[in-house]
Image (spheres, rainbow, N blue to C red):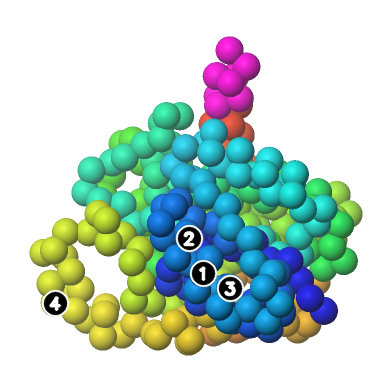
Amino acid sequence: MVKTILITGATDGIGKHLAKKLTSEGHHVILHGRNPQKLELALREVRAVSLRGRVSSYLADFSKLDEVYRFAEEIKRDFQRIGVLFNNAGLYAGKERKVSAENVELTFMLSVLVPYILTTELSPLLEKSADGRVINTSSYMHHFAKVKDLDFGFEKEYNPGLAYNNSKLYTIWMTRYLARDFFLKGSNITINAYHPGLISTNLGNSSSDEKTKKSLFGRLMKSLSKDLDQGIETGYYLTLSEEVRGLTGYYFDEKKVKSVSEKGYSFEKAQKLMDYCQEKVKMFQEKQDF
C-alpha cells in the first residue's frame, strides 16, 4: 500500500536517506527543512530516485513556534490524510543555553515540544489513515539522563550533553503518554520511539567545537558510527512493517522492542512534562491573540 509519509529534518542524514528509499518504492514523501537551499537540493535528489515523482517540500524553522504552527497549517491545507509522521528533526546544541521566544531550550524544543505539537495538530490527518503512525526519534543516550528534578528548560543546570540525554528521555515519556492518550480515546494512531544508532551526520555541526570533534571521544564516536543504510533500518521498519501494526508506546532499537530507562519515570511526572509543553503552547497562543 502506498503511504503519504511526512519526515521532518529531511535535508540530510537519516531523514534524506530514508526519504530516498521510501520514494524510490513509490510512496509519497513530504520533506521538511529549515534551510531553503538545502531543502531545494534535497527535493531534487529525492525526486531523482522517485518511482512516481510524488515528493513535496515545506520550509520551516522549528526553533520558532510560529513557523511550527504555520507548517502544520500548510500540511492540513494541502493534505487530507497522512499515513506516517516521522519526527526526525533534532539538535545537539552548543555550550551556551539557547532558547526560543517562549524560553524553551532548543534541544528540548526540537526533541519534545515540536513533535508534541505536530502530533496533536496533525492527528486528524493521521486518524483518516487505517494505520496512522507517529515515529519519534530518541536515542540510547536517554539511559544517561540525569533527572534530579523536572527542570525541562534546563534553567538550573545546563550543558549540551545533559540537555541532549534528558530530552531523549523526555521524548520517550511523551511517546508513552500520548500512546496511552490515543488508546483511551479509541484512536487508531500508534506512536513509538526509536534509537537510530550512532550515525555520522551533520547533527550539531553548527554548534560543536573543533576541539570536541578532534578529541579521542569524537574520533571514537565517528569510528563506531553506522552508515546511513544501517541507520535507517529501524526507522524504515517502523514506517512500513506489518509486524509493528497496532503496537504503541514502545521504544525500538535494531528493529526490536527494547527496555527503557525508568529513571524518575512515573505517570505523574509524564503528566508534568505534558503540562510544561501545554503551558508553552498556551503562552505562544496568548501572544498571538494579543
Kind of residue indicated by mark 2 = Glu
Residue at the spot of label 3:
47
Pointers 1 and 2 in contact (C-beta within 8 Å): yes
Mark 3, other Cα within 10 Å: few <14 / some 14–19 / many ≥20: many
Residue at the spot of label 2:
40
Q: Earlier in the sequence, mark 2 or mark 3?
A: 2
Residue at the spot of label 4:
216
Please, what secondary structure does the residue beneath circle 3 have?
helix
Residue 76 seen by the camera? yes
Kind of residue indicated by mark 1 = Arg
Give the dominant element type of the magenta stretch: helix, strand or loop: helix
**How far, Cα to Cα, is label 1 from label 3?**
5 Å
Numbered circles on residues, count: 4
Q: Is residue 264 magenta?
A: no
Q: Going 58% across and 58% down the picture, which residue do you hit?
A: 57
Residue 167 seen by the camera? no
**How far, Cα to Cα, is label 1 from label 2?**
6 Å
Residue at the spot of label 1:
44
Kind of residue indicated by mark 3 = Arg
Q: Earlier in the sequence, mark 3 or mark 4?
A: 3
- Magenta-drawn segment: 283-290
